[in-house]
Amino acid sequence: MKYYIISGEASGDLHASNLAKQLFLLDNQAQIRAWGGELLRKTGVEVVKDYKDLAYMGFVEVVLHLGKILKNMAFCKKDILEYQPDVVILVDYPGFNLRLAKFLHKKQIKVFYYISPQVWAWKKSRVKTIKQYVDEMFVILPFEQDFYKKYNIHAHYFGHPLLDVVKQYHISEDFKQKNNLDNRPIIAILPGSRKQEILRMLPTMLNVAKKFPDYQFVIAGVKNHQGLYAQSNIKVVYNQTYNLLSLSYAALVTSGTATLETALFNVPQVVCYKGNFFSYLIAKHLISGIKYISLVNLIADDNVVTELIQNDMNEICLKKELEKILSDDTRTKMLESYKILHQRLGDGSASTYIADKMIQLLGNK
């Protein structure tokens, strides 16, 4: 069977690579060509376009790079037609992938969509596009299955693939020694991966850290933003977030996938978010019916972790909430809620189940 995968971001490369491993294992005739990154390459997939050439965030950036985006789309269409795959697997990246789905449908090429766009939060009009042009939808959040059901779309749910990654992770035994950490309990600081996130979150997090001398705070850093951490005497570790979380007693986390990763490592956390004021107002207007911003609370459909958003993301509130998760009662309650979260996310074999289902649907079983 011939597969063509389109992943346009780092997280897509991660989940697509785990899916590709399973496709190779379950289909001994598998040939896979893809857009992705190093993780997909390591599985033996032929990567024809690196996702680093595709990742444009925000309206202005997209407009500025429109010529390149259109050129990439033209190349993609041509390459798929020449390759003649049995299926194209679109991984998240909706701005590009949903446009491509329409083209593929017209060319009568089967389309599987893996990791749904967040249509339940905003741009619900995209559901119509999905219903019309996507043959099979594979979702990774439990409530997404019920959401699609409202639109008479059957979505497959087998658990969240992050659990697969955490389950397979091996902790580095000499992490503390290599990073010169002492024996005080560790509080992880995850200020985000984008420059603007770090600039908005980190100063408040660092000021709060000064008020807890009995703990050592460690920043999960991004190498291409090294200069942003220079203002602090706090230790920074790069590309070792899972090692850090595996040894942490608590965490301050910028909203995003990191909130779910922190929960999967059973680390009590405070979720933080502060964006551009006008962007926040626009987003608040566009997003309707969503009570929470963190994946942990969204999946649990409960206020498991405290979310400090915009003006609430200040030193007083952050200190107060950190004190709470360091106390026994709040910690115990949060860790119990994490157990329920784990149950809803499957058994850590989502990639295997999804690959198997895809092969079944393609009639190669």
Image (cartoon, grey):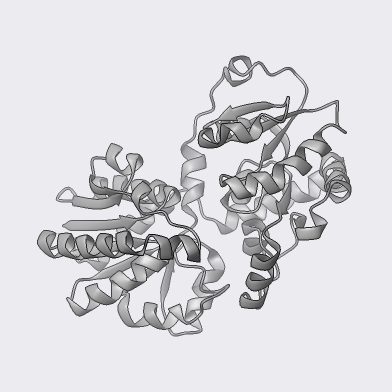
Q: Nearer the viewer, residue 110 or 180?
A: 180
Rendering quarter of residue 246? top right
Q: Up-down: is 347 above or below 223?
A: below
Q: What residue appears at the point 45 percent right and 50 percent down from the top-left corner? A: 11
Task: Reply above or below: 248 against 113.
Answer: above
Residue 93 horizontal/vertical position (percent): 41, 61
Q: Residue furthest front?
A: 64
Residue 85 appears in the rendering: no
Give x and y (percent) for residue 204: 78, 43
Q: Is residue 348 above or below residue 88?
A: above
* Residue nearest the observer in this picture, 92 or 161: 92
Q: Is residue 215 left or right of residue 245?
A: right
Please tell me how many numbered marks the rendered image carries.
0
Tell me the residue at 59%/55% (across/down).
343
Q: x, y percentage for residue 334?
A: 76, 50
Q: Position of residue 215 (x, y in %)?
A: 80, 28
User: If the image is split into quadrants, where does the C terminus sit?
Assistant: bottom left
The quadrant in which the N terminus is found is: bottom left
Apparent side of residue 78 relative to residue 295 in the rendered image (left or right): left
Instruction: Say whether residue 286 is visible.
Output: yes
